[in-house]
Amino acid sequence: MLADFHIHSTFCDGKSRLEETVETAIEKGFDSIGFSGHGTTEYDMRYCMKDMPSYIAEVNALKEKYKEKIQIYLGVEEDSYAPVDRNKFDYIIGSSHYVIRNGVYYPVDSGKERFLKCLDAFGGDHLEFAESYYKAFCDYISSRKPDIIGHFDLITKYEETDTDLFFRNVKYWKIAENYVAESLKSGCFYEVNTGAIARELRTSPYPHARLLKVIKDGGGRIVLSSDCHFAPNLAFRFDETKAFLRDAGFRTAFALYNGKFVEYEI
């Protein structure tokens, strides 16, 4: 099974048109793909969709046009603070791109400088920052139950290149592992996201291997995704990621096919 369900386009912050991505997926032999444009976030309009009706209409038109060649699904990546009307979509990815402090939305993945402002908002206390981020995200996951949980440990995006705050901190791991265990109660799928590898920010996917172990031991289910913003990066390093997942104890993943999530061997 070759499939990818975290894909952005020029409707938000992606570089490729929807149809260009579909044609690339067909050339690569994909079984199914799902588009997941960023839902509108009125508190930060820099990267999100401004014309969701046109996005929905175009994805649906492409479904029909290419139905004999590939299965296409209409998804959305909603931010945890900006839920969408999920009835309009085949699936939703629930992600947390912000942390709120004193009523201000601070983006955690909009470049290193903005990330450091998140830390400043917590007086430089990275553990309080992590606790606040994960607690709010898990509260959202518990109440909303998105189909797929997006890049669970996104706050570690710059850990290997710039920050060095979390991975060598025992107290951080206690926080992160406790919250990923809590999120398992939702029954949602977890994406294993290679996007930060494509951007040369991480050497392994989200979630980190330590969190994947908690997910595996807790019976969690996974979906492979590339968080693709540029058509050539579809399924970025999926072969290596499947080997990584097998080493972590996973033997199967899930993908949307024939209208439902189906299990396949990795």
Image: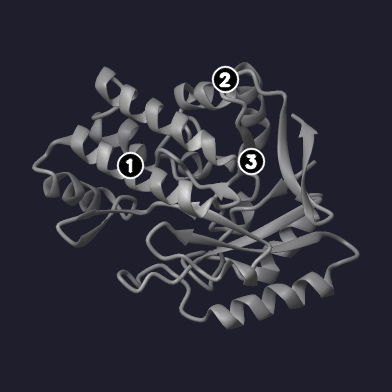
Q: Earlier in the sequence, mark 2 or mark 1?
A: 1
Q: Residues within 10 Å of mark 2 (few under 14, many from 20)?
A: few
Q: Quadrant of the C terminus?
A: top right
Q: Can residue 169 be seen in this view?
A: no
Q: Is residue 114 visible?
A: yes
Q: Which of 104 and 3 is in front in this view?
A: 104
The residue type indicated by label 1 comes to Lys
Q: Which of marks 2 and 3 is nearer the N terminus?
A: 2
Nearest to the eye among marks 3 and 1: give it: 1
The residue type indicated by label 3 comes to Leu
Image x and y of residue 56, in percent: 64, 76
Quarter-of-image position of residue 131: top left
Taking the spot 46% from the left edge, 79% from the top edge, the residue there is 50
* Residue 118 in the figure: left or right of residue 266: left
Using the image, determine if residue 31 lies above or below residue 135: below
Taking the spot 37% from the left edge, 54% from the top edge, the residue there is 97
Q: Nearer the viewer, residue 84 or 112?
A: 84
Residue lying farthest right? 68
Using the image, determine if residue 115 lies above or below residue 78: above
Image x and y of residue 75, in percent: 62, 62
**Residue bearing mark 2:** 217
Mark linked to residue 135: 1
Q: What kind of element bears circle 2?
A: helix
Q: Quadrant of the N terminus?
A: top right
Using the image, determine if residue 27 lies above or below residue 184: below
The residue type indicated by label 2 comes to Asp
**Residue bearing mark 3:** 224
Q: What kind of element bears circle 3?
A: strand
Q: What kind of element bears circle 1?
A: helix
Q: Which of 193 and 135 is in front in this view?
A: 135
